[in-house]
Image (tube, helix red, strand yellow):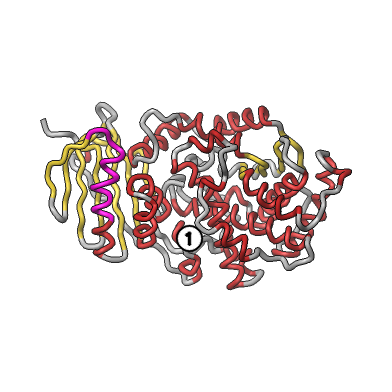
Amino acid sequence: MLFAGDGHARQGDGELNGDALETSMDVEFTVSLVRGHSKMTINRLFALLAAFLLCLVPAPAQVENSRQLFTQIEPILQDVAGITGFKMKHKVPADYISKPDLGQFLQRRIKEVVNPEEIRIESLTLKMFGFLPDDYDLKKAMIELMTEQAAAFYDYDHKRLFITESETSFLEKRAALVHELAHALADQSFHLGRFLRKRNKSDDAGTAREAVVEGQATWLMWAYASTLGGGEAKVSSFILDSMKGASDSAVGSQFPVFEKAPLYLRESLIFPYTEGLRFQDAVTSKLGKAGFTEVFVHPPVSTQQILHPEQYLAHRDPTRCDPPRIPNARRYRKIGEGSAGELDFRILLEQYAGRETALRIAPHWRGGSYRLYESKQGRNPLLAFAAEWDSADTAREFFEAYRDHVLKGKWRRLEAGERDAQHSAGSGDRGGFSVTLEGSRISVLEGLPEAR
C-alpha cells in the first residue's frame, strides 16, 4: 500500500488489455506479498457473514465439510453475473489447500516475483517513516500474517481458486467461495493481475485499486447473501454502518499474529475489504449496475477517493506534490519513490498522535509524495517527503503533530536544534532532520548527515 499515486489523471486507465506492463516488482509488498497474483480474504469477514447467513438459509447437511461445495460454483457464478452484468466466459477450477501448503505457496510466489533487494527497500521505507520497528522482519511477518488470515484466494495468473482447509463452517466456506468467484468473474473481463500491476509498486493508487478488487468482491458476497434470503441484491445499511471506521479490532484476538502486527500492517490488510465495500456501495448507489464496470475502466487514483467516494464521482484527483530536493545529491542514489496518501497519514498520525488527531487532520490531505535515497558510501538512508493540505491552518496542525508527536515517538533519540513557527531541525536516530512549513505544504528531510 505505501503510498499514493502521483495524481495523474485517469486518461488511458480503461485500456486494461495492453501488453506494456511494468517489469519491476509486481507486488505491493506491504499489504500482501502476493498481490497481483493471488488475493487472500480475511477470516473474520466470513465469520460475520456466516452468522448472517444462519438467519437466512440452513447449510445443506450433505455438503457440510465436503468437496461437494464446489458443485455450487456454476450457479453462484451465474447469480453474480446477473448482479454485475459481467459475462461468464469459462469455468473456474477450484480446490482446497492446507495451511502448510499455503505457506509453501507463499514462499514460492515471493521467490518468483520479489527479489531480496526489493524487500529490503520496501522494509527500509516503512521503517524510515516510522511504520515498522528497525528490527522488524517484514518478509517473515507477512508470510505468517497471510497464512493465518487466509480463508481463500484466487490465483490471477493460473486462473484457479483455492479454499483453505480449516475447521470453519460450511457457511463460512461458501461465503469465501462467493468472494473468490466474484474475483474470478471480474478477472474474465478485466484481467485483474494486469489491473493491480498497472500502478507503481509503492503507490497509493495501487492501494485504491486493491480496494476496488476486494471491495467489489466483498459487496457481492453480502449482496448474494441477501438474495439467498429472498431480498434484493444489495448490502444493508446495518452492514455498511458496521463496516464504517472498522479497524483491526474487528478481527479479534483469535488471530495472534495479526493482533501483534504493527498498526500499519493491520490497517493495510483490513482497508481494502471494509472501505472498499463502502466505496463500491456508494458508486453502485449512484451509477447502478454500470458502477461495477466503471471502477475498473476508470479506477480511483487515491485512497482518499476510496474513503470519500464523492471525490471519485466528482473526478477530484490529488494535487501534484513533489518531495523536497536533497543537499549534496551527487552523494546519493535514489532507491525508492511513491506518493503518500490520506490513509498513510491517517495511520501515521494515529500511531503517534492518537486516533482523534488522525481523523481530524488526515481527511484534509490533498497530495503527497516521497523519495528514498541511500548514500553511495555507507548506504545511509535519507527520506524526503512532502504533503499538501487543503489550508494553511491544517498544514500547521500537521506540522505541529509531526514535530511534537511523530518524531518523538518513532525515535529513541531526538535532539532539537532550530525551532520556530515555520521550521524545526535537529538530529535523531537516523541522523539530521528538517521539517518546514510553507503555506499549505510540509517538507521533510530525515537522515541528513549530522554536523561534526
- Residue 41 in which image quadrant: top right
Quarter of the figure with residue 264: top left
Mark 1 residue type = Leu
Q: Secondary structure at mark 1?
A: helix
User: Residue drawn at (37%, 55%), measured in percent from left and top?
Assistant: 356
- Residue 397, horizontal then vertical, whole percent: 26, 58
Q: Is 410 contained in the magenta span? A: yes
**Residue 193 part of the magenta segment:** no
Quadrant of the image for the C terminus? top left
Whether residue 219 sits left or right of residue 122 in the image: it is right
Specify whether residue 124 is in view: yes
Q: Quadrant of residue 96?
A: top right
The percent position of residue 330, horizontal first and vertical second, equals 22, 38
Q: Position of residue 133 (x, y in %)?
A: 37, 33
Magenta residues, start to end? 398-413
Residue toward you, 270 or 186: 270
List x then y, in percent, for residue 268: 49, 46
What residue is at 56 percent from the left and 31 percent from the top?
144
* Residue 340 visible at all: no
Q: Main secondary structure of the magenta part?
A: helix
Q: Residue at x 67, y 44 (%)?
A: 154
Decide: is 34 above or below 200: above
Q: Which residue is mark 1?
A: 307
Q: Residue at x 44, y 38 (%)?
A: 262
Q: Is residue 397 left or right of residue 173?
A: left
